[in-house]
Image (cartoon, grey):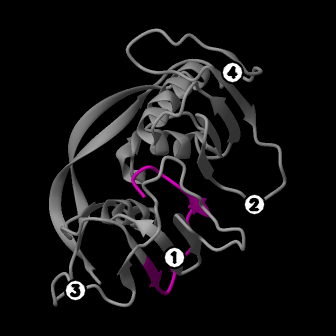
Amino acid sequence: MGHFRTATVAAVAMLVLVPAPGAPQDRPAQAQATTGARPRFDVASVKPHRATDDIMFALQFHDGGKLTATGSLRMLIRTAYHLQGSQLVGGPDWIDSELFDIEALSDGDPTRDTTLVMLQELLAERFQVRVRTERRERPVYELRLADGGAAVRPQLSRSAADCDASSPAAFSPDARLVCGVSYAPGRLDAVGMTMRALATNLSLWVDRAVIDGTGLEGRYDLQLKWAPDGVPHAPQFLSTPDL
């Protein structure tokens, strides 16, 4: 299918969290202003995650402009800004340890990209997230095609799933993965994944940013297996706009 190739350095866009006072505002859902250049949710609730389940991160887009999410502040920021792990610098000491539940609604049926802009605004309001973007020289891994060119192998087949729909299903009624990615120690299974998203997901398991150099367009179904050195703090299910 492909392989990693180590690049010496590459200019990587970094999102730097600028310190801001205060913990997340734990208050009930309320109407928010919708004026201004950037879209906002009309109603949103942000609460500490109290369940005793083993969810580390989950995010789903629903019909009717609804977004639900559970995750740490780091994972919420990464998702909202399309970031790999090494591209986020700074943050409070609880950025990984505390989990939060988000439920938000907006009028109409906005696109997933627009919904993520709304999530950025929500994080700014409720968590006082302040960011700036820098470009830094960093060592990276580049995902490239192995010898043999762009031939699709059995482990990498073009997907028939409609993952470009406004609200694609994550799982089928019989619990089969439809659009998304699932993890287990030493294993990654994905349906309807772009190569850009594969690079992003692989960055969860390595120590540097991963960039896509395959040149492959479209969406693919794939399965990866490897001998794990350890299990990182990765989501058990992640559905992102660039999947």
Quarter location, residue 22: top right
Within 10 Å of disc 1 (Cα), the crowding (few <14, some 14-19, many 20+) is: some
Q: Give the image location of residue 118, x and y in percent.
A: 50, 28
Q: Which residue is mark 1?
A: 189
Quarter location, residue 122: top right
The local secondary structure at tag 1 comes to strand
Within 10 Å of disc 4 (Cα), the crowding (few <14, some 14-19, many 20+) is: few
Q: Which mark is residue 54?
A: 2
Q: CA distance from mark 2 to mark 3?
A: 38 Å
Q: Nearer the viewer, mark 1 or mark 4?
A: 1
Q: CA distance from mark 2 to mark 4?
A: 24 Å
Residue range corresponding to the magenta coloring: 222-243
Q: Which residue is mark 3?
A: 151
Q: Give the image location of residue 222, x and y in percent.
A: 43, 79
Q: CA distance from mark 4 to mark 3?
A: 51 Å
Answer left or right for 112 relative to 96: left
By secondary structure, the bulk of the magenta-drawn segment is best described as loop
Residue in the picture at 58% in, 34% down: 65
CB atoms of marks 1 and 4 within 8 Å? no
Residue type beneath disc 2: Asp
Residue type beneath disc 1: Asp
* Looking at the image, residue 45 lies above or below residue 5: above
Q: Which residue is mark 4?
A: 25
Q: Nearer the viewer, mark 2 or mark 3?
A: 3
Residue in the picture at 75% in, 20% down: 27
Q: CA distance from mark 1 to mark 3?
A: 20 Å
